[in-house]
Image (cartoon, helix red, strand yellow):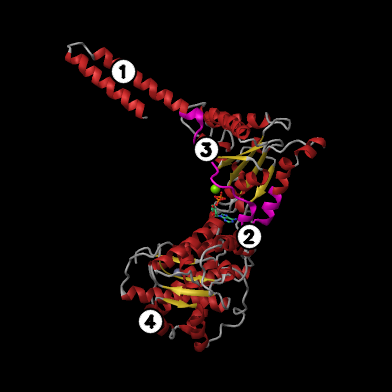
Amino acid sequence: MLIKEWILGVGVAFLIFLAMLHVNVVPLLFLAGLGVVLWMMMDRRSAASMGNRETPARHSVSFDEIGGQEHAKKELMEALDFLRYRDRIKNLGIRPLKGILLTGPPGTGKTLMAKAAATYTDSVFLSTSGSEFVEMYVGVGAQRVRDLFRRARQTAKKENKDSAIIFIDEIDVLGGRRGNLSHQEYDQTLNQLLTEMDGMSTTQSPLVLVVAATNRPDILDPALLRPGRFDRQIKVDLPDKEGRLHILKIQTKGKPLAKSVDLEHIARETYGFSGAQLESLVNEAAIIALRQEKEEVTQQMFRDAVDKVLMGEKTGRKPTDDDLERVAVHELGHAIVSELMRPGTVSHITIAPRGNALGFVRQIPETDRYLYTLDHLKQQINVALAGSLAEELHYGNRSTGAQNDFMQASGLARTMVKCGLSRIGIVDEENLPDAVLDTEVRHILSEQDRVTRELLTPYKDEVAAFADLVVQEESIDGRQFRDWLDSVGHNAPTGLKNPVSGVVAMESDVSASF
Ligand code: ADP
Ligand code: MG
Ligand code: ZN
């Protein structure tokens, strides 16, 4: 770049010099302009063909550093044995494995797995992303694919390795169904990738293995999934409780944790968190410790960090006292019903504004859960509706603070209808008229509104005093809340009381116009 500027400077000086000698510089200026344009175009091309955007791995990752994902790890290692025991594979005449597709939500460790695969097989690692092949100029993407494979082989040779792993993140960007996006450039790039993969053989040295990642395997061009291409698909799902614990252990290794820290409990509380979110949780907790000038990270800091990862940073909003009391009453509504339905599930109640929420009740899932019974869904609707109902019972009116609750409740009701759990029985989701769905959702909601009201009414008079305490303390522990609930001592109407264990999604209250 320096040279370019230098030449430019000299050129300009020369032109000024000529102009001072009364030479006509206009044609020269024109030529110079043309030269610059040509130069810039060349620059583009060479930058494109160098494919210099792939980043080499900085440090090697091992499978031990990946928490949970036991199944995916095992499957991947088995697949990789193709590279490790190449002779045996050749003797048996087995077709070499060319592509592995990792599918799953963001932040679950797909990139980590690809890096670990390179370490495990002692391969060089090149990483790129589907979006980096997308260019306005036709042919550039295809050129980049060609260069990528060439570079992989070159690098492997240079580093004296037998194999190279090319990692393509977001493969769906370039491997979406052809014709769907109907863009010639995508087609060329994808075709080039397929050609490169088809051209690979066992006898080649170094061997190249393509590992690709996507969270949308459904939109991939079927040509990519044909045998001999990405014929191994490995699911990398959100971690279960054991997986989360494992990830937490990995991420907290070497960090100063207070004795009070119970990683098991944190793993239980973080249902639905990805590995990346857990990593960020650990980091946030440490930042809180730093801010408080503490040497150790405590359980309380982890709790705040979970709130932060879930709901966002604490906001500086200062609601009026009236609003604070209303939020407290609202949250108590959620908490009471949650506790009546599933004792022990309230982790804490907070009315410190965070993200979009003015307050929230965090619930502890009892177990990870993948199936929901009808009772369970109804209970979740009850919990969602309880905030607004508590306001109505206490103030005689509702507010705008329950928008999110209602969205959640109707979402659950829609699930009930679509899964054949409503009074109209089994339905064909595709041919379900909107009007019917609407009527059923409304029916379910009004019924559950009635049930929730019944649950809450006995607490109508006692809520006020406790709400004051919530306002004072800003955050109330689940234990303290349960003590209060016991002291009030109403029983839930029989038939509604039986707890069903399981998870209730975190719920929050978006303030529309508070
Ligand atoms: P993906 O590629 O699936 O989006 P990444 O592999 O890029 O996810 O993960 C991002 C970060 O999150 C990692 O660098 C790591 O710190 C953390 N992480 C994600 N999954 C795991 C896991 N299973 N074990 C340990 N850390 C993880
Ligand atoms: Mg990634
Ligand atoms: Zn609410």
> Is label 2 within 8 A of ligand 3 (CB to nearest ligand atom)?
no
Q: Position of residue 214 (x, y in %)?
A: 58, 45
Residue located at (32% from left, 23% from top): 7
Residue bearing mark 3: 54
Span colored in magenta: 47-76
The answer for how far apart the CA atoms under marks 4 and 1 are is 77 Å
Label number found at residue 419: 2
Precedes in sequence: disc 4 or disc 1: 1
- Does residue 331 show up magenta in the picture? no
Pick the front one: 338 or 145: 145
The answer for how far apart the CA atoms under marks 3 and 4 are is 57 Å
Relative to residue 346, is residue 124 drawn left or right? right
Q: Position of residue 321 (x, y in %)?
A: 32, 76
SS class of the residue under badge 3? loop
Q: Residue furthest right?
A: 92
- State if disc 2 and disc 3 touch (CB < 8 Å): no
Q: Residues within 10 Å of mark 1 (few under 14, many from 20)?
A: some
Nearer the camera: disc 3 or disc 2: 3
Precedes in sequence: disc 4 or disc 2: 2
Residue located at (31% from left, 15% from top): 31
Residue located at (24% from left, 17% from top): 15
Pick the front one: 262 or 177: 262
Q: Residues within 10 Å of mark 4 (few under 14, many from 20)?
A: some
Residue 389 visible? The answer is no
Residue bearing mark 4: 468
Nearer the camera: disc 4 or disc 1: 1
Question: Which amino acid, by three-letter code, is at mark 2?
Answer: Cys
Residue bearing mark 1: 32
SS class of the residue under badge 2? loop
Precedes in sequence: disc 1 or disc 3: 1
> Is label 1 within 8 A of ligand 2 (CB to nearest ligand atom)?
no
- In the figure, residue 424 lies in which quadrant? bottom right
